[in-house]
Image: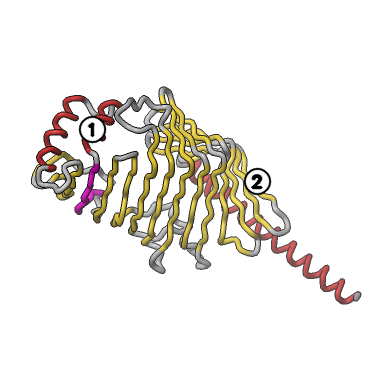
Amino acid sequence: MRKLLSLTVVLAALYGGYWFVGSRAVLSGVESALTQLRAQGQVNYASVGLVGFPSRFDLTVEAPEVRGRDIRWTAPFLQVFALSYRPNQIIAVWPNEQSLTVAGQRIELKAEDMRASALFGTETKLPLDHAQMVVKAPSLAASGWFAKAREARVASQATEEDGRTHRIGVDVMDTDLTGLETGADVPATIDRAYLDATLSFDRPIDRFAGETPPRLSRAEISSARIIWGPMRIEAEGTVEVTASGTPEGKLTVKLTEWRQMLAGARTLGLLSSVDASNLERMFEGVARNSADPDSVSLPFDLRQGMVYLGPFPLGPAPRL
């Protein structure tokens, strides 16, 4: 019994030493990364702390702030949890209230629960294997408008060993737009917004992604759809992204109940009356050759920095 007790004490001491060394390494690495990003003007924070002995690493960043071009995110805290015996699998938890400023407009983000999990490879570069995020009852509020959803989910799964290609899924359910002046032209609830796509990058998503962010090189959209009452927007296609960020490829967009869409876009102020009338005439022409006059299929061609609808140029393509 005495020997067993002694062995238990030794093992406990060894494990305690492992936790102490591991926790110091984790905290030092996080503080070093945050200090570097703070020097670059990309992040700010009040403090960083780590607890969780003996079985977890519980990291808390107080008052985090992330800045980018025309965007700023702030929150009271951000927490990241990992089991001390499996540190390559983490869980991140956000507070119920956050703030996002985009192009000068402040947006308040709330949620009943917002958390994500991720599993990284055991190699030294820690390539991302898969991740998922679930947000329950998210809501967005800004000056003059308000929207909320029942649930939002995002998932990513590496499809190649080097971690350069990921299959991405996004699903937002029951988005309530009663805070917007939708008018009688469109329903007050978007039933579902869904995306299934495969994204390829020029380098893996791993521990060095913060130093040199991976650049999107290819996007294959298997299915993207918005179901809004009787209206549907569906898209599919493949786009290659050049080194300069110019997209090249083809996308096919199908609009069902497009007349109601145009009326709703005009009511919401997304389209002027002139633009809506011009699009209506164009869609009428396309619908004449469709088996269903309430649906139109629009082939978009992206080439040489321009966007074409069939043979007609629409304008410059966005830079990615």
Q: Is residue 180 magenta?
A: no
Up-down relation of residue 22 to residue 143 (above or below): below
Horizontal side of residue 109 vs 270, given as left or right: right
Residue to which mark 1 is pinned: 262
Residue at mark 1 to residue at mark 2: CA–CA distance: 52 Å
Q: Residue at x 91, y 75 (%)?
A: 2
Q: Position of residue 310 (x, y in %)?
A: 11, 47
Which label sits on residue 56? none
Q: Which residue type carries mark 1? A: Leu
Is any atom of residue 224 visible in this view? yes
Per the rendered image, the range of residues in magenta is: 245-256
Residue at disc 2, secondary structure: strand
Question: Does residue 252 show up magenta in the picture?
Answer: yes
Residue 294: x and y in percent read 19, 41
Q: Nearer the viewer, residue 16 or 159?
A: 159
> From the viewer's perspective, is 270 left or right of 311?
right
In which quadrant will I find the N terminus? bottom right
Question: What residue is drawn where x is 57% and y is 53%?
Answer: 91
90 relative to 217 in the view: left or right = right
Question: Quadrant location of residue 237?
Answer: bottom left
Dot 1: element: helix
Residue count near mark 2 (Cα–Cα under 10 Å), binned few <14, some 14–19, many ≥20: few
Going by the numbered disc 2, the residue's amino acid type is Gly
Q: State whether residue 91 is above or below residue 74.
A: below
Identify the residue at the far top of this view.
144
Mark toward the viewer: 1 or 2: 1
Q: Is residue 106 visible?
A: no
The residue drawn where x is 25% and y is 27% is: 266
Report the magenta stretch's main SS: strand
Per the image, the residue denoted by label 2 is 49
